[in-house]
Image (cartoon, rainbow, N blue to C red):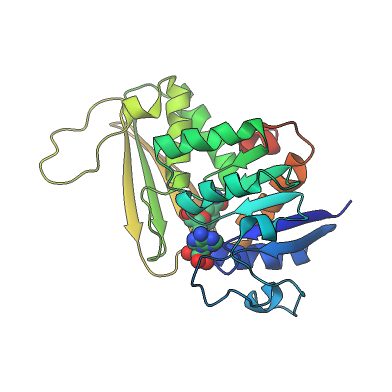
Amino acid sequence: MTLKIAIAGVAGRMGQSLVRACETVDNCEIIGGTERPGSEALGKDIGNVAGLQPSGVEIVQSPAEAAKNADIWIDFTAPIPTLAAMTALDMTGVKAVIIGTTGFNEAEEKALQEFSKRFSIVKAGNFSLGVTMLTALVERAAASLGDDWDIEVLETHHRRKVDAPSGTALMLGEAAADGRGTPLKDLQTPPYDGITGERETGKIGFSVRRAGGVIGDHEVLFGSDEELISLRHTALDRNVFAKGAIKAGQWAVQQSPGYYSIRDVLDL
Ligand code: NAD
């Protein structure tokens, strides 16, 4: 059966990457896409905007219109438009929602989870297989190494990224905190700046860099007085996130409504 996909923010970096990735996946069709009010991409053809042949699908503003005949909605935009779209999708036939948007605050995250009564939702700070594997390794290392090992999550992204630390860095921090059996909010250090005092034992720190066109680079550093262990992932092409999101969509349409992670999709 062909998976019919509608994409939020289809003219964005991830939106275009999703359109191109769908071309390389069997039984995948983009049947709609949205852009923000005032965007120059409104009314343009989805294929053209992604640098492909015309697809006959026009970019619109309304999520309900874009998703009229869709099985799944894929959203890589920003927290407010993502939440607004969920309400608009309620009256459509959409079964599953894949959320790659990052930067949700606690209240927004809660609001999002409410929609899992209606849709099967897969939300991930990173849809790449490599990062999903890295997350599992980090959890294992944090569980095996004692609290006297410092844990630092380091990330580098392109200069246009608007939230920090990245969704992936937070996901890795959560994996380390899970390994230690304590919620991340109880272990996360405040950002290092000024006279910070000595580093507290057992805490998880974050460091952020923004430069050029870096797609995404994450490292988790475990440090004792005698040695360092570094687990690192570098994304070489945005395509990895797009392919992972489409794979999550293929999986999610077959699930009952609920809130799922990429680790559920890959059965890790
Ligand atoms: P981008 O700015 O290139 O694209 C976002 C697009 O959303 C833009 O085209 C923008 O016009 C559009 N948009 C904004 N408001 C809208 C609205 N109301 N309706 C429709 N479209 C709207 O950004 P990007 O690099 O593609 O990243 C988007 C999000 O995805 C960010 O939160 C980023 O952190 C996240 N991201 C997640 C992953 C992952 O694997 N989970 C990977 C890469 C990026």
Residue 34 locus on image (x, y percent): 61, 63
Q: Is residue 209 visible?
A: yes
Residue 87 locus on image (x, y percent): 58, 44
What residue is drawn where x is 73% and y is 71%? 57
As drawn, is 205 to the left or to the right of 17? left
Residue 246 locus on image (x, y percent): 71, 52
In the rendered image, the residue lying farthest to the left is 195
In the rendered image, the residue lying farthest to the top is 181
What residue is drawn where x is 16% and y is 33%? 198
Q: Is residue 130 visible?
A: no
Tell which of 225 and 196 is nearer to you.
Answer: 196
Tell which of 175 and 39 is nearer to you.
Answer: 39
What residue is drawn where x is 31% and y is 24%? 148
Does 99 sit above or below residue 265?
below
Residue 32 locus on image (x, y percent): 71, 63
In the rendered image, the residue lying farthest to the front is 91
As drawn, is 173 to the left or to the right of 239? left
What residue is drawn where x is 36% and y is 50%? 164
Does 122 sit above or below residue 239?
above
Tell which of 234 and 210 is nearer to you.
Answer: 210
Does 242 sit above or below residue 134?
below
Q: Quadrant of the C terminus?
A: top right
As drawn, is 150 to the left or to the right of 123? left
Q: How many marks?
A: 0
Does 137 sit above or below residue 92?
above
